[in-house]
Amino acid sequence: MAYSRAFSYDLPMQSKMKSLEELFGSRESIKTLNKKLAQHAALLARIRQLLPEPLGDHCIGAVPHETRLVLFVDSPAWASRFRYLGRDLREKMKSEGVALESIKIKVFLPQSAPAERHHPEEPLTLSAESAEMIRSTAECTESDELREALLRLSKHGSR
């Protein structure tokens, strides 16, 4: 009894869903949000113009934070290429009138389904030579468990 009373809650039923205006407070906050999005899009477009070819296509976001800039790229491989260009990009931004202390690169991977595993058409087999090497290693192994496991593995060799 005490348990059920301790964890029973009277949650008020909400009679209607909140409107976007109620969620964002006012139209001004939506305008401010749209203005910031437009500024970020313009900044991203300008940064893409300053980057050498193919890099601009892999820069998918730019967010300023005071004297820092965070760039989002679409893969870890491109992130390392961007890191090498940090100093050059800062200099180009400085010539545009934007002084930055640092540029941080972050990887933003799109959400996708897990990759399908590729299963070979033919099952993998252990060669006779490899099986013999595993068997001879098992004979020299002090651990009983490891010896048994190696012997079982060696039996999968082609004969």
Image: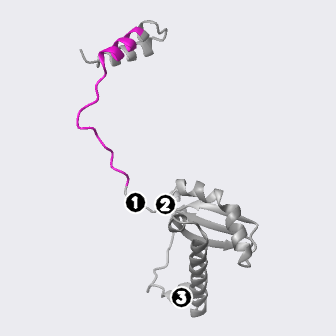
Query: Residue placed farthest to the bottom in the image?
Result: 27
Q: Is residue 131 left or right of residue 91?
A: left
Q: Nearer the viewer, mark 3 or mark 2?
A: 2
Q: Is residue 6 left or right of residue 115?
A: right
In contact (CB < 8 Å): disc 2 and disc 1: yes
The figure's colour scheme reads one colour
Q: Could you say which is closer to the camera, residue 134 or residue 87?
A: 87
Q: Could you say which is closer to the camera, residue 140 or residue 83?
A: 83
Query: Which type of secondary structure does the marked residue at label 2 adopt?
Result: loop
| Residue 109 magenta | no
**Which residue position holds label 1?**
112
Is residue 149 shown above or below 8? above
Is residue 82 shown above or below 68? above
* Label located before the other in sequence (3 or 1): 3
Which of the numbered marks, if any, corresponds to residue 22? 3
Q: Residue at x 58, y 74 (%)?
A: 49
Q: Residues within 10 Å of mark 2 (few under 14, many from 20)?
A: few
Q: CA distance from mark 3 to mark 1?
A: 33 Å
Query: Residue placed farthest to the top in the image?
Result: 139
Q: CA distance from mark 3 to mark 2?
A: 32 Å
Magenta stretch prevailing secondary structure: loop
Q: Is residue 91 left or right of residue 3?
A: right
The magenta span reads 114-136
Instruction: Where is residue 111? Give x, y as percent.
Output: 43, 61
Q: Residue at x 60, y 92 (%)?
A: 28
Q: Residues within 10 Å of mark 3 (few under 14, many from 20)?
A: few
Is residue 60 shown above or below 120? below
